[in-house]
Image: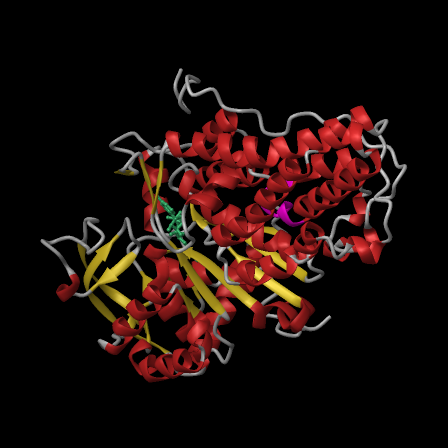
Amino acid sequence: MSAADAFYITTPIYYVNDKPHIGHAYTTISCDVIARFMRLDGKRVMFLTGTDEHGQKVAKSAESKGIDPQAFTDDVSERFRELTKLLNISNDDFIRTTEPRHRDACQALWKTLVDKGEIYLGSYAGWYSVRDEAFYQESELVGGKAPTGAEVEWVEEPSYFFRLSAWADRLLAHYERNPEAIQPASRRNEVLSFIRGGLHDLSVSRTTFSWGVPVPGDPAHVMYVWIDALTNYLTAIGYPDTTDDRFKVFWPTVHHTVGKDIVRFHAVYWPAFLMAAGLTPPRRVFAHGWWTIEGEKMSKSIGNTIDPHDLVSTYGLDQTRYFLMREVPFGNDGDFSRQAMIGRINNDLANDFGNLVQRVLSMVQKNCGGKVPSPGVDASLLAQEPLIADAHGLVERVRPLIVAQSYHKALEEIWATVGAANRYIDREAPWTLRKTDPDAMARVLYILMETIRHLALVVQPFLPTSAARVLDFLGVAADDRDFKAVGTAHALLPGRDIAQPQPIFPRIDTSAPAPGAG
Ligand code: MSP
């Protein structure tokens, strides 16, 4: 299989200084949606997530708990792995930066950069923020703090440097040639103006602590945590073995999804490291926005951090996935509010989609003996029915939106068809036809069932469990659920038994306790 049929998607690897929250769940779910979509669409997919375990921030967290850093990272990393299970994430690998395969990849990349004359020994004197794991220029500080508000400390130590200053023009040329490589456009502009402002050589090693990957040939130094962290994307596909099939197939297709706070690392440092090592820069870096909680910044000190476990147990998993993907245009900041969440569940999921399925399948149970009714017309005539034509075109319309990571628009598009189906059922009123024209009733119900089949197929990446239940109700075989099943060739067979439907999205009682309460 060639790179044209492949797709590589990554989440950031999460720092293990803290337990998972809604922000982590958000990125990971968004990547899961595109990974699932691409698989259903016939692509060979590599979906990577994992944990970022080295560096001063993690070392300090372990120290403050009086635990050895390896034992500490073993424990917290497991919580992130467990998060992928909780959220029904279909990742193909879970990488930890403390694994031997990763140390080998980092050291190989380092040696390549040294061999190419891109790394030299010097000494660093400047500001460092442990919270951001970032170096800052004096001119960037705001009121003595990092622009992010994090504390900074003065650091003076011997350090290896990467010749970042030499890469500005080539980075600009790369982004000129590949305008799609940073998204959304607001982030692209931010990156371009940062590069145009001039780049300084980057300190890429530290000597004042040892929790990191040792620099080859100079073990007094550990690698700067970001060069270590970014390399995870290469490790997981077999680097340094560039003849590895995974490396050849997936690397040219890599799409990094990150939060807006870590764009500079992914869109400036990372492509420069890669080009300097003779590797291609990422195909795309997409930076999403940040969630606030009921209008407030999420923070441990305010105590408003949302644990994904609470969301899932209060609202349900697919409901949580739906809300996060539907509520906010991907790339914008958004607010999580309980009211908005309940509104989405009760309106979009329970009333619009859930009810449609329930009404249609209950009518089939009651009036068609629990079997797929006969449409009474042949497939080509049926395909001309506007609602069926709409359903057949769904995947084609949704695909470019998913490719653009416009998840909210993809859901809007799907729900436009849900709306069309609801209007159709009201207009055709099959409950009336039952007495006046049973054949017409059968045709209307068949058209609705086929529409529901297509809705369930296309919504699988967002709502994997609920879509599977709908397809189960319809009796669609497990191997007939990818996008090849779109269209008349795989249509429901009249006479086949269908299951008794159960409500898929119960309405949420607005007086139910808030997540985490009690
Ligand atoms: N370890 C680095 C990433 C290295 S990737 C080579 C890191 N880790 S992190 O755990 O601090 O953050 C991971 C992601 O969570 C970031 O993309 C960040 O933007 C995201 N979020 C953290 N808080 C968030 C919100 N409140 N809302 C949305 N995403 C947020 O950075």
The residue located at (40%, 78%) in the rendering is 175
Image quadrant for the C terminus? top left
Image quadrant for the N terminus? bottom right
| Residue 313 image offset from top left, x and y in percent | 51, 25
The residue located at (25%, 31%) in the rendering is 302
| Residue 182 image offset from top left, x and y in percent | 41, 68
Residue 413 in sight? yes
| Residue 173 image offset from top left, x and y in percent | 38, 84
| Residue 485 image offset from top left, x and y in percent | 77, 53
Indicate the quadrant where residue 357 lies: top right
**Residue extending farthest left:** 143
Is 462 magenta? The answer is yes
**Residue extending farthest right:** 495
Residue 95 in sight? no
- All told, the count of numbered labels is 0
Q: Would residue 438 appear left or right of 163 to someone viewing this image?
A: right
The residue located at (47%, 19%) in the rendering is 509
Foreground residue, 170 or 58? 170
Residues in magenta, as a range = 458-464
| Up-down relation of residue 295 to residue 192 (above or below) | above
The chosen color scheme is: secondary structure
Q: Would residue 475 appear left or right of 252 to someone viewing this image?
A: right
Foreground residue, 207 or 13? 13
Foreground residue, 210 or 426? 426
Is 384 magenta? The answer is no
Indicate the quadrant where residue 196 lies: bottom left
The residue located at (30%, 59%) in the rendering is 207
